Image: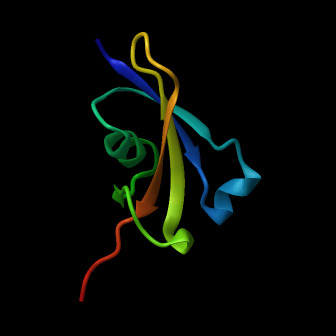
Amino acid sequence: MTKSFRVVDLRQDAALVDTDIVVDGVQSPEAAVRDALGIKVVRSGAKRDLVAKVYWQPLDQPLTMVRLYAKTEEH
């Protein structure tokens, strides 16, 4: 069964537009953000790097949410 993810864009410039994007046909919240916003993300990071919340509901399960952070390059 295909999952449906609701991506909420939390970037500062997104505050002026509709920030909820529904993405179907991907297998993970990270893939949903990559498709919706075009950026690579990870599940942990600094609060300043928070870019999105992703919601989905597995069959017969409660609503699930994960916070995703911009992936920073290690130097």
Check the image and report above or below for 44 versus 55. Answer: below
Percent of width and height locating residue 21? 55, 35
Q: Residue at x 52, y 59 (%)?
A: 51
Q: Which one is nearer the viewer's eye here, 65 or 69?
A: 65
Q: Position of residue 31 (x, y in %)?
A: 32, 42
Q: Quadrant of residue 13?
A: bottom right
Q: Position of residue 48 (x, y in %)?
A: 56, 73
- Tell me what residue is drawn at x 44 percent, y 61 percent: 69
Q: Quadrant of residue 8?
A: top right
Left or right of residue 18, residue 58 in this image = left
Left or right of 12? Residue 54 is left
Q: How many marks?
A: 0
54 displayed left or right of 43? right
Q: Identify the image's colour scheme: rainbow, by chain, secondary structure or one colour.
A: rainbow
Quick one: quadrant of the C terminus?
Answer: bottom left
Q: Is residue 21 above or below residue 73?
A: above
- Against 26, residue 14 (above or below) is below
Name the image quarter holding the N terminus.
top left
Identify the residue shown where x is 31% and y is 37%: 28
Using the rendered view, name the quadrant where residue 11 is placed.
Answer: bottom right
Between 74 and 45, the one nearer to me in the picture? 45
Residue ranking furthest to the bottom = 75
Residue sitting farthest toward the left: 75
Q: Horizontally, is 29 left or right of 46 in the view?
A: left
Q: Position of residue 39 (x, y in %)?
A: 39, 57
Name the residue rendered at 37%, 56% in the picture.
43
